[in-house]
Image (tube, rainbow, N blue to C red):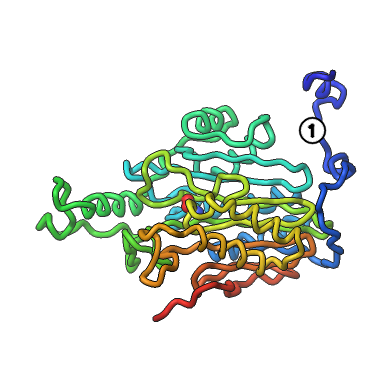
Amino acid sequence: MKTRRDFLKTSAGAGLSAAAVAGAQPLMGAPAILLRRNSPVAVASSNGLESVATAVGVVEGGGDTLDAVVQGVNPVEMDPNDTSVGYGGLPNADGTVQLDSSVMHGPSRGAGAVAALEGVKMPSRVAVDVMRHTDHVLLVGKGAQRFAISMGHPIEELLTERARRRWIEWRARMSDRDDYLTAEESGYPPPPPPPEDEGDEVDLFDSHDGVRPHGTINCNVVNREGDLSGVTTTSGLAWKIPGRVGDSPIVGAGLYVDNDVGACGSTGRGEAVIKTCGSHSVVELMRAGMAPQDACLEALRRVVRFCVAPRLQDEQGRPNFNVNYYAVNKNGEYGGAAIWSGAGFAVCVAGDARREDSAYLFERSG
Ligand code: GLY
């Protein structure tokens, strides 16, 4: 029997080429999707308008699909003003920023992920390194950070002044039985806001979609050849219990890519997506023949069926949180859907990057 070392010797250290993988037996159950796409398509969460344009630009220039989506999300990870992703993300309950990310490369069937990673501004790049340089899929916590250092990633402070101030205000408002004072309770005039915060109203307990602030970016692309890749990256739920891991770095939950079928990623309440294997469900529904938007809606109905705890329901028994899916199939057909109306997603088709409304299960009143 050949060892891995023998294999590496005979292949001169090269990994499996996409062509070699493509020549393998097709997956059982893969649908006969006719390729009728004539341009690359990228789809992303609504904060990914520039990301989809970048991703399509990279694959149009002959670049790899995974490089395309990672390059697409890197500026969002580096943006100190985006408090839901990478540098500048809102911290956990201890005031430490912990990041989650996963990547999947369709042609090589590769996957890599990191969770609860501290000190690295672009966790998606570490996820790529896990995929490229290890036989593992997911590294977490201190081990993920040691691995990142070994790959040359600098360790930096990720907590910006804006995120730190929001965290101390949240901590002070948690209870009136502890010794932390809110700005009103202290009696002193509050310090001037950091310049980037001026005019920026943020509810520390409730974001626009009815849950504690948390955001994420997901971006998926299909090129002219029908090859797909995807990435999801986030700072996760604001004020989370240290060590909490959401759906974003869980392959099959916050991201799934099957090069025979399509790609999907998610944003929103990660616990609900993990319990229903969300992105994997969407891809399997597309494999069975559903259009991307319909597949997203059906996977969201599963989220609703799993939402039986009263603490997670509104007065009509519906989820009091949101989940969003973004999907593209091998044909370049795409769609986005959310539990609640009012959500959107970014898409780039034929060089035109735009936002579109997501389909939804329930209409928000008011
Ligand atoms: N969907 C991001 C999270 O729950 O962490």
User: Viewer-proximal residue, 231 or 272?
Assistant: 272
Where residue 336 sits in the image (x, y, percent)?
Answer: 61, 67
Q: Secondary structure at mark 1?
A: loop
Query: Going 55% across and 72% down the picture, which residue do you hit?
Result: 360
Task: Give the amino acid type for the residue marked by disc 1 in the picture.
Answer: Gly
Query: Going 83% across and 43% down the picture, which residue do you hit?
Result: 18
* Quadrant occupied by the N terminus: top right
Query: Going 66% across and 62% down the picture, which residue do you hit?
Result: 327
Where residue 283 sits in the image (x, y, percent)?
Answer: 69, 56
User: Viewer-proximal residue, 353 or 308?
Assistant: 308
User: Viewer-proximal residue, 353 or 345?
Assistant: 345
Number of residues whose C-alpha sits closer than 10 Å to that of mark 1, classed few (under 14), some (14–19) or many (20 or more) = few
Q: Determine which quarter of the picture holds residue 262.
A: bottom right
List the single residue furthest toward the right.
Answer: 23
Instruction: Locate residue 96 relative to residue 125 in the image: left or right.
Output: left
Query: Going 41% across and 40% down the picture, which residue do you hit?
Result: 157
Q: Determine which quarter of the picture holds residue 209.
A: bottom left
Where residue 228 sits in the image (x, y, percent)?
Answer: 74, 53
Instruction: Locate residue 75 relative to residue 160 in the image: left or right.
Output: right
List the single residue furthest toward the left.
Answer: 187
Instruction: Locate residue 117 relative to residue 93 in the image: left or right.
Output: right
* Quadrant occupied by the C terminus: bottom left
| Image position of 135 with respect to 108: above or below | above
User: Viewer-proximal residue, 52 or 112?
Assistant: 112
Q: Which residue is mark 1?
A: 15
Counting labels gives 1
Mark 1 CB in 8 Å range of ligand 1? no
Instruction: Locate residue 205 relative to residue 262 in the image: left or right.
Output: left
Q: Determine which quarter of the picture holds residue 123.
A: top right
